[in-house]
Image: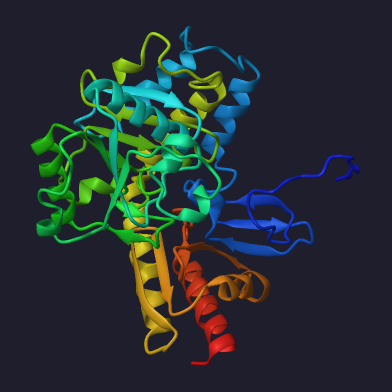
Amino acid sequence: METTESPLKLVRFYGFRGLKLVKGSGQYVWDSAGRKYLDCHAGHGAALLGHANPDVAEAVARQVSELVAASSGFTTPALEEALHWFSKVAPGWAREIVFLNTGTEAVEAALKAAWLYTGRRRIVAFRGSFHGRTLASLSATWNPKYRKGIPVLGEVEFLRFNSDPAEIAGKVPSDTAAIIVEPVQGEGGVEPASREFLKALREEADRVGALLVFDEVQAGFGRTGEWWSHQHHGVEPDIMTAGKSIAGGLPASAVLSREGILEKLSGGMHGSTHAGNPVSMAAVTAASRHAVKVDLPERAREAGGEMLRMLGEALDGLRAVRRVKGLGLMLGVELRFDPGRIIRCMQEEASVLALKAGATTVRLLPPYMVDGGDARWAADAVRSCICRGYGC
């Protein structure tokens, strides 16, 4: 492929990994030199259904040849089909939905709906949280490095994630509009919440009349072994955000709510040029159909269990490893030091792509079709890189 020089300097949001990726298939990607990698990065988990998924690719190609843009002031067959098929994987408590473009936009809409519905302003979030980088979602994101120099909203209170229910009881202020939490923290270190913790949040929300918001942008759509990670615990929110993998890797997100909440955003209170666009909706339909066809939660549960087992065996006894953790295909290896050197080694020496979570965790978010050989590949890569740099 010919490359043309540009007078424009590309500004990157993330540190450059030094790779030019040119092709993907399933759980693998190839760089411009023809080298094959096991992709446990997967676009921050967006490629859960694999690269070049044939069902998604066919649907998108067909839609692009028919209709590429339409405001949500209209309806289209693509939007209607997406609503039909996504309802098959949506949680049973949900009664309203809006389709958007990104996870952070979904969180913005969720919080706006909570403010309008309750007439209050305070948000309760949690240490280690990551909800996005636009203004409201950034305000509810814990890590100060993302907020440095940005005038974020002041009425946000952070409590300790996964704390004992007794620590939560009575701690949510009476003027709270919403409690927002990830049932599995991703950026915060791949930390699953406990049933008792989520139940305590439900009780606190009910006590003060606040809305409970579950951010399922990364953990949802089957990745953890249930369609939505809160379903592991039987605790239901009032609002849920979804994104990343719901369109097979294309830009799409959604917000779901109980009756009468999201409708507060109608009449121009929220909007987006590309929300519900036909191409992304065709991808949502194809992704939902494919996920149902292959029983995505079961596949993620089995593949994730195998990878978790192999990681545990490979890393057992290593002083550098605190613990192996996760749920389904959302996995983490918590180290005793910054994992940057290990992640670079995995890429350069073992051809495995991974990413960082929290301060010390190697995060693995592979597509669902990873098999036992891939699990061994990833486990051996982590072990060899730790042993090479820090000893066994």
In this view, 188 is above or below 48: below
Q: Quadrant of residue 227?
A: top left
Foreground of the two, 218 or 120? 120
Foreground of the two, 336 or 149? 149
In this view, 345 is above or below 363: below
Foreground of the two, 145 or 199? 145
In this view, 310 is above or below 34: below
Q: Using residue 118 as the reference point, say whether residue 36 is left or right of it.
A: right
Residue at 42 percent across and 39 percent down: it is 137
Residue at 8 percent across and 38 percent down: it is 207
Q: Position of residue 328 (x, y in %)?
A: 34, 58
Q: Is residue 328 visible?
A: yes
Q: Position of residue 359 (x, y in %)?
A: 46, 67
User: So how many labels did they put on this image?
Assistant: 0
Residue at 90 percent across and 42 percent down: it is 4
Q: Quadrant of residue 64?
A: top right
Q: Quadrant of the N terminus?
A: top right
Residue at 35 percent across and 26 percent down: it is 112
Q: How is the image coloured?
A: rainbow
Q: Position of residue 111 (x, y in %)?
A: 34, 31
Q: Using residue 209 as the reference point, say whether residue 331 is left or right of it.
A: right
Foreground of the two, 160 or 23? 160
Q: Position of residue 69 (x, y in %)?
A: 60, 15
